[in-house]
Image (cartoon, rainbow, N blue to C red):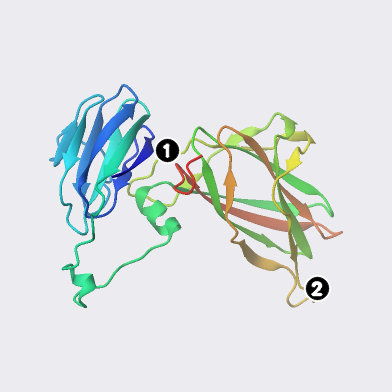
Amino acid sequence: MSSIRINLPQGVWTNIVTIGADGWVNQTQGDTQVVYVIAETAPTSFNPQTPTRYETERRQGFEFDGLAALESIYAYAINDDAEVSVSIEKGTSLNLDAGYFNGLAGIISQTYTEANSKLGTQHEASALFEDVAGLASNNTIFITGALPLSLKGRVIGYSGLGVTAEIFRAPTYTGGTIAAYQNASDINPVTGLSQIITGATVTAPGTLVFAPDYLIGNTSNQGKGDPGKVLGRERLLRRNTTYLLRLTSLDTQPQDITSLLSWYEGELDLPRL
């Protein structure tokens, strides 16, 4: 028998069992009702009237026996965060009669970003900074919420010689305005917990937490600038923490700079922080 504890953020369908297995689920923390659904894909919303194969009340559990090869168990904490313990019987095996083991079906894989977008947990924000003075910096304050945050990518474009992109933790700043951002799903977007603040006055940048990105452009008149470089290295940000996203011009003349951020907000699988 193997067991694992899984956090359930309030109002989010969380996959807690992903193999054709025998075992049981027990709620260990959180005095709130948790609803469980067995399905091939996560529900896109919560509806108490939707038929489910299991429903449990507070601090109760249930036993599951022989999930189908493509089925998973999804849990939804209604009024507050919760935690469940999932126990799997030793010796549980995959269904070897499933089509993808004998050439009758294929196994479909997808990236985290694709899955996050389908679940409505992938967020994005973009900005255009015009006529940034030579060697000047543009500062954006990014404040994370109660969930871990995975910065999936930054796309930075510029019209001049280049840009340095840096991320600092715990900057000192005053003022600024909260800016809106968007979601990668127009079907079931989850409201983000993070905040973006623009126009703040930064008096100290804080601690540099990731290696800076130096983006060098073409110096010829015909090819000057770059429409957008993708900074694809994933960066993990702490909960409830303030960061400074700084873009510094490498050009001595004014240039335009664009920035696109894409991030996932939610619990991480390896490890749970």
Give the left or right position of residue 172, taking residue 124 as reference.
right
Q: In which quarter of the image is residue 32?
A: top left
Q: Is 89 displayed left or right of 254 in the figure? A: left
- Label 2's element? loop
Q: How crowded is mark 1: few (under 14 residues within 10 Å), some or many (20 or more)?
A: few
Residue lying at the far top in this picture: please name it: 31
Tell whether 248 sits left or right of 263.
Answer: right
Q: Where is residue 130 in the image (x, y as percent from the top left)?
A: 71, 53
Residue reaching furthest right? 252
User: In the displayed structure, would residue 120 be above or below residue 68?
Assistant: above
What label sits on residue 191 in the rendered view? 1
Residue 50 visible in the picture: no
Can you see residue 127?
yes
Q: Residue at x 38, y 55 (%)?
A: 115
Residue 215, percent from left and from top: 73, 63
Residue closer to the observer: 162 or 3? 3
**What amino acid is at disc 2?**
Thr
Tell me residue 270's x, y (percent).
48, 49
Which disc, if any, is residue 111?
Answer: none
Q: Residue at x 77, y 52 (%)?
A: 248
Three-letter code for the amino acid on which mark 1 is drawn: Thr
Distance from disc 1 to disc 2, alpha carbons, whole Å, reads 42 Å
Q: Is residue 158 left or right of 133 when viewed as pictured?
A: left
Please say if the residues under marks 1 and 2 sit with CB atoms less than 8 Å apart: no
Residue picked out by circle 2:
219
Q: How many marks?
A: 2
Local crowd size for mark 2, using a 10 Å CA cut-off: few (<14), some (14–19), many (≥20): few
Label 1 sits on a secondary structure element that is loop
Q: Which of marks 1 and 2 is nearer the N terminus?
A: 1
> Whole-percent x and y of residue 224?
75, 72
The image quadrant where one finds the N terminus is top left
